[in-house]
Image: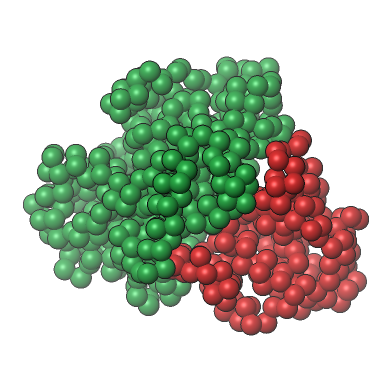
Chain colours: A green, B red
């Protein structure tokens, strides 16, 4: 019997022939923490082997969740993390470099890698064929010290997507629909493995969006096979030599198979306060909003800003709506300026924030007021997520977000003239 | 620091899909290096009265998918700091499960519908039983993988690794 992508990668990295259900110890290619999970990770790491790192070049700290720092306590946390990086020689990415998951895609993730991070959206790197998953600070501290960790080899759901997306329908709509099908815990402990002719034509940016939200159905990883799209992306980031072809075996065993037709999908929204509470945008047409947030590790990439700019070009946001845009990385911001997306968004009335997590998790830069409604391109809409349990969050694609910024109410991007 | 074999306390009931944002919201990120202050906000967005009412030994008794969302281990940590002796749930999200065990906090999967708020609960970790002393219901909880039991019996992952130097499967 053949192997799934997860079984192949975990066999390779554990040096054993492993199957779903086995518990293995595997070598890790990259372990990281960010500024809100990092301080606990570092304190725990200092208790294990006195904070000596197994491999400083494969250990990274990202300052992204609270940058520029909004207060004294977080500034002190940042200092603590910078000192740790100086002491240990691990890699550190200063505030403004970008969101950890975007930087992992740009600088580290390769097909067949195992990547673990003290952040649940570490799954994002599955878009490049990495077995990538989030863990807590203690687990990551031990990987910092030992270079390895234990995994239960997950059973896999095969998600086959064929057909062609309609205009203004894409990766975000697909993954919101899928989470609606699976439920918020429908894939708990499982791997989601994607395939099909719609997947083959998806860009890496789109694959990262889908993989990013695998965790919202409870999954351990959301993983794509590697192909020419992967090869070209790695080349564009200066990592041609890291490409390897990685596909599941034709006779691999799957716990469940789900087939979706991309051409039948339409713009989707997740309603408050659960990511699986999804409905087509048209069902919510006319819902008033106070804030639009375009950015995050889900939808802050160049293609996302391009979609927003295409809709907002030579137009103005509705005057009642605040429009916040945070590019996912410095690379994304630089390219978006060079092409002119940023200029279009600013002319449309957007506030441009530095590359980072920004308003996503309620720390700063866009905290909602009581009874306010935000339409966000992020991945979570839990009660209190954006800093106020009395506020409501809807999740949608950058195209839907931009269309809604124009009207001040939830709007299907296909309706924009 | 092996957890007590028999745990006793009252049940604090919660529904399905209690996220880490309910347990400890991101807006308190600035308190994560000041744990006593952070712990005052435990479960705040699910039940603002919980922090003042919970007593050492009590249980969180939840529905399905407890602890979904962020990887913040502070969620498990502040529950442990509140004195909660174990979490009983129909199911639990993956990262939270590892985090709780890594903090030495037992997570027991059982049919929590049979337990009401305020019931007196007794858990026997070696016999894998949950007894509701108020209504007389007896439940068994699901098996925990050996590697997690070993970590739990050392009081968490850091004490486990400090003692053994490596993982022992």
Q: Is residue B169 or residue A43 the one in the foreground? A: A43
Q: Where is residue A68 in the image (x, y as percent from the top left)?
A: 30, 60
Which image quadrant: the N terminus of chain A?
A: top right
Residue A87 in view of the camera: yes
Residue A164 in view of the camera: no
Residue A275 higher or lower than A235, as above or below: below
Q: Which residue is drawn at 50% across and 65% down?
A: B32
| Left or right, B80 with reference to B108 | left
| Left or right, A43 with reference to A127 | right
Q: Which residue is drawn at 57% across and 76% down?
A: B40
Count of numbered tags:
0
Q: In which quarter of the image is residue A147?
A: top right
Q: Where is residue A373 in the image (x, y as percent from the top left)?
A: 34, 68
Q: Position of residue B104 (x, y in %)?
A: 72, 57
Q: Is residue B127 or residue A265 the one in the foreground? A: B127
Q: Residue at x 68, y 66 (%)?
A: B80
| Left or right, B74 with reference to B64 | left
Q: Which residue is drawn at 89% across and 55% down?
A: B126
Q: Position of residue A311 (x, y in %)?
A: 18, 48
């Amino acid at each position: 019997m053949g192997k799934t992508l997860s079984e192949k990668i975990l066999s390779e990295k554990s040096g054993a022939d492993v199957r779903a259900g086995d518990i293995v110890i595997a070598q890790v290619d990259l372990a990281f923490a960010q500024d809100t999970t990092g301080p606990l990770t570092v304190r725990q790491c200092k208790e294990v082997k006195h904070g000596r790192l197994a491999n400083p070049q494969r250990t990274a700290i990202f300052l992204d969740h609270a940058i520029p720092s909004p207060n004294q306590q977080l500034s002190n946390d940042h200092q603590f993390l910078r000192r740790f990086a100086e002491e240990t020689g691990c890699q550190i990415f200063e505030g403004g470099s970008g969101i950890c998951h975007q930087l992992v895609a740009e600088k580290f993730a390769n097909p067949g890698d195992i990547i673990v991070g003290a952040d649940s959206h570490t799954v994002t790197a599955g878009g490049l064929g990495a077995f990538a998953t989030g863990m807590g600070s203690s687990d990551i501290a031990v990987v910092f010290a030992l270079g390895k960790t234990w995994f239960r080899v997950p059973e896999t759901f095969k998600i086959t997507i064929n057909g062609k997306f309609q205009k203004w329908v894409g990766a975000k709509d697909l993954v919101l629909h899928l989470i609606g099908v699976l439920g918020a815990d429908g894939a708990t402990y499982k791997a989601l493995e994607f395939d099909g002719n719609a997947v083959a034509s998806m860009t890496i940016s789109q694959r990262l969006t889908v993989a990013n939200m695998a965790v919202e159905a409870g999954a351990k990883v959301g993983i794509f096979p590697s192909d020419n799209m992967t090869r070209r992306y790695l080349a564009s980031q200066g990592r041609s030599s890291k490409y390897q072809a990685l596909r599941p075996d034709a006779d691999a065993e799957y716990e469940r198979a789900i087939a979706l037709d991309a051409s039948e999908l339409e713009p989707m929204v997740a309603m408050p306060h659960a990511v699986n509470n999804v409905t087509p945008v048209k069902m919510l047409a006319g819902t008033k909003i106070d804030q639009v947030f375009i950015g995050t590790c889900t939808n802050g990439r160049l293609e996302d800003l391009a979609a927003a700019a295409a809709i907002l070009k030579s137009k103005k946001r509705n005057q009642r709506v605040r429009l916040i845009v945070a590019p996912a990385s410095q690379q994304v911001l630089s390219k978006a300026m060079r092409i002119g997306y940023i200029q279009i968004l600013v002319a449309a009335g957007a506030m441009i924030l530095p590359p980072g997590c920004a308003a996503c998790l309620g720390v700063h830069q866009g905290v909602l007021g009581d009874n306010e409604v935000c339409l966000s391109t992020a991945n979570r809409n839990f009660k209190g997520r954006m800093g106020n349990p009395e506020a409501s969050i809807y999740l949608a694609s950058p195209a839907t977000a931009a269309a809604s910024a124009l009207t001040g109410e939830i709007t299907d991007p296909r309706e924009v003239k | 620091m092996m957890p007590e074999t028999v745990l006793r306390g009252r049940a604090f009931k919660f529904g399905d899909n209690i996220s880490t944002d309910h347990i400890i919201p991101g807006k308190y990120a600035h308190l994560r290096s000041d744990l006593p202050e952070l712990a005052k906000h435990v479960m705040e967005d699910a039940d603002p009265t919980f922090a003042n009412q919970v007593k050492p030994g009590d249980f969180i008794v939840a529905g399905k998918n407890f602890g979904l969302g962020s990887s913040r281990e502070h969620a498990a940590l502040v529950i442990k700091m509140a004195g909660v002796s174990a979490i009983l749930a129909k199911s639990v999200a993956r990262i939270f499960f590892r985090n709780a065990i890594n903090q030495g906090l037992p997570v027991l999967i059982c049919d929590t519908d049979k337990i009401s708020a305020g019931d007196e609960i007794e858990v026997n970790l070696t016999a894998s039983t949950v007894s509701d002393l108020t209504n007389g219901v007896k439940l068994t909880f699901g098996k925990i993988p050996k590697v997690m039991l070993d970590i739990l019996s050392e009081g968490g992952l850091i004490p486990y690794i400090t003692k053994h130097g490596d993982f022992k499967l």
